[in-house]
Amino acid sequence: MRPVPEEMAAKLEAAADSIGTSFDDVRIDEIAEASGIPRATLYYYFHGKDEILGFLLRSALTDLVAAATDAVHGPGDAAERLRALIAAQLRHLRSRPGTSQLLIANLGKAGQLPEIAAQLDDGFHGPVRKLLREGIDDGSLRDVGDPEIVASAFFGAVTAVGLRGIVVHGAVRVEEIMASLTPLFWGGVAAPEPRAEVP
């Protein structure tokens, strides 16, 4: 695949909002119409629509990896940096609503592309696992079991809530979501144990 010019990349990313959530039924002519890029030009840079999907997903995940790296290496203990990482994922969903929906809807295809699967791990799962281990070590987080399962649970919850915001509200309300997710993730939903009365 040839290097894609920035202006063309921006047009494809903007078109992702109108393409829909699955590339299975989309024709290259529809991508050309949605993006304003001539069909011949698309074929000059891409062999077909699957390469366009791969390009969009790689581009989005490159940005997510950068945001995750900033959060992981930011200030604060592991718990504070984990909150920053979750907020970064929500901001990423907000900044690329169409591409984010394409990514989630096409995870099966993404899983067949090792590079994209690795980027997804670098952009969220890996940093969460790292911060969980650090949090146990620094005492800011408790040991909740297998870091891989916890990272997947965080990714699923944050992604589902973010996508719901896109579909229902037309936007990801990061601060509002964080206000609900933070106590849920850190405290759970179980009622606190009643305090034993001191005689």
Image: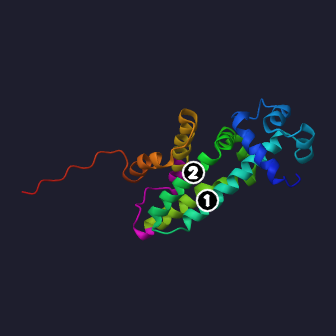
Hey, what amino acid is under mark 1? Ala
Q: In what element is the residue under mark 2?
A: helix
Tell me the quarter of the picture where residue 119 sits: bottom right
How many labels, in total?
2
Q: Is residue 111 above or below residue 148?
A: above
Q: Residue at x 55, y 63 (%)?
A: 71
Where residue 104 appears, as percent x and y from the top left, is: 64, 41
Would you call the spot at circle 1 few (<14 residues within 10 Å), some (14-19), or many (20 or more)? many
Q: Residue at x 56, y 40 (%)?
A: 171
Q: Give the side of residue 116 with respect to residue 42, left or right.
A: left
Q: Is residue 153 above or below residue 76?
A: above
Q: 16 and 187: which one is in front?
A: 16
Q: 169 and 142: which one is in front?
A: 169
Q: Is residue 26 above or below residue 115?
A: above
Hey, what amino acid is under mark 2? Arg
Q: Earlier in the sequence, mark 2 or mark 1?
A: 1
The quadrant of the image that shows the C terminus is bottom left
Q: 104 and 67: which one is in front?
A: 67
**Which disc, if any, is residue 67?**
1
Where residue 106 appears, as percent x and y from the top left, is: 70, 40
- Residue 91 within the magenta-colored segment of the rendering: no
**Which disc, if any, is residue 91?**
2
Mark 2 in CB contact with mark 1 (< 8 angstroms): yes
Q: Give the side of residue 178 with respect to residue 25, left or right.
A: left
Distance, label 2 to label 1, CA atoms, is 9 Å
Where residue 185 appears, as percent x and y from the top left, is: 43, 51
Q: Which residues are magenta?
A: 137-153
